[in-house]
Image (cartoon, rainbow, N blue to C red):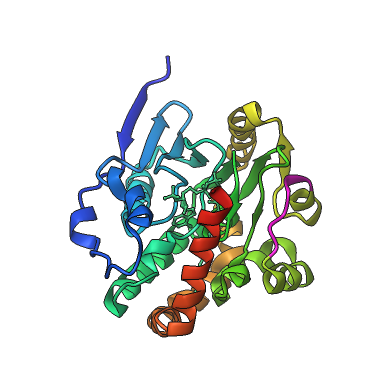
Amino acid sequence: MALRTAFRGRAALSGLLSCSSHGRLSPSFISQRKNSTSPKIKVDYDQTTGVAVMRMQSPPVNSLSLDFLTEVCISLEKLEMDKGCRGIIITSNQPKVFSAGLDILEMYGKSPEHCGEFWKAVQEMWLKLYGSNMVTIAAINGSSPAGGCLMSLTCDYRIMADNPRYSIGLNETQLGIVAPFWFKDTMVNTVGHRNTEMALELGLLYKPAEALKIGLVDQLVPEDQVLTAATQTITKWLAIPEHARQITKSMMRKQTIEKLRSNREADIQNFVNFITKESIQKSLRMYMEMLKQKKA
Ligand code: CO8
């Protein structure tokens, strides 16, 4: 019988890491933070298969806040330390959304120090996921724009729900911001230069069928079969001799990872300088207002 253990990423660091808003937003933008002390990640680790299912559960849209990123990193560290854990499936517990990408509220009206700390956490998550020795599968059961797409792109394989209401892509230019070089590199490594050039310049969000066509996702399945398909796929990947697979993965990704590793501080500084510009803050505000209007 499967010996199933469950543990949750702790929000223990959240109090230490989060900073208060500088308050240029209306109270309704802030209201989504009321659940901030609940665990944002739930990990179910099956010791017999060596596979962990990491479920994102940060309402309403699994946006990548500083707390969220911290929990992801802690969960990944715990799994990496467990020698029996060989694979991770990342999926969402929120309806209709895999992840809405970076939490815009972490980049709007914040101090340069906060923005720097936030960006370091984004880098850390990417480094941990893209550099993981484990087999990683994204079970994309909802929309996955920007940072959500990046998270999927770090995985070895992407399975998406075949629902035309969902979309995936790096849509940063639509917000008036620029995807950093390592977002771009991860995309190029997946779908090639030409597809990335078009996708990034236009900030394209692809429906599942279009995403499959350009190789942004590897497989489409009916919505209720995403997790089953991910479990079947990971079993196949885990059947490959481990050492050979890991060395090959590292060989394919090393250069891209090294490029960020050796430029982390400069990348943080670039981000802070860019995101705190008045014109960029204005673009973010307009984008958030657009999201509100779409809802109304
Ligand atoms: N951050 C913070 N709040 C968000 C975000 C987000 N990324 N996305 C949505 N929300 C909020 C909405 O404002 C709304 O708030 P409220 O309930 O208070 O009105 C709530 O979440 C629910 O949103 P929706 O009603 O829109 O939910 P839907 O289920 O209809 O749609 C979507 C879900 C499709 C995810 C939709 O919310 C959406 O498109 N969100 C925006 C996604 C997006 O564009 N993200 C980009 C973030 S930037 C990024 O990830 C990379 C940045 C790289 C920076 C580089 C700079 C140098």
User: Residue 118: in sight, yes or no?
Assistant: yes
Tell which of 91 and 189 is nearer to you: 91
- Name the residue located 48 percent from the left edge and 79 percent from the top edge: 280
* Mark count: 0
Tell which of 41 and 154 is nearer to you: 41
Residue 292 higher or lower than 175, as above or below:
above
Measured as percent of width and height from the top left, residue 35 is found at: 30, 43
Quadrant of res 118: bottom left
Residue 279 higher or lower than 20, as above or below:
below
Lateral position of residue 17 relative to residue 226, left or right: left
Lateral position of residue 87 relative to residue 234, left or right: left
Is residue 121 a member of the stretch shown in magenta?
no
- Name the residue located 71 percent from the left edge and 69 percent from the top edge: 196
Is residue 205 a member of the stretch shown in magenta?
yes
Measured as percent of width and height from the top left, residue 106 is found at: 37, 64
For this orientation, the residue located farthest to the right is 213
User: Residue 262: in sight, yes or no?
Assistant: no
Tell which of 274 and 123 is nearer to you: 274
- Name the residue located 62 percent from the left edge and 72 percent from the top edge: 173
Quadrant of res 56: top left
Q: Main secondary structure of the magenta part?
A: loop
Lateral position of residue 54 relative to residue 109, left or right: right
Q: Which residues are magenta?
A: 204-209
Residue 94 higher or lower than 260, as above or below:
above
For this orientation, the residue located farthest to the top is 1
Image quarter in which the N terminus is found? top left
Measured as percent of width and height from the top left, residue 112 is found at: 31, 79
Measured as percent of width and height from the top left, residue 128 is found at: 43, 58
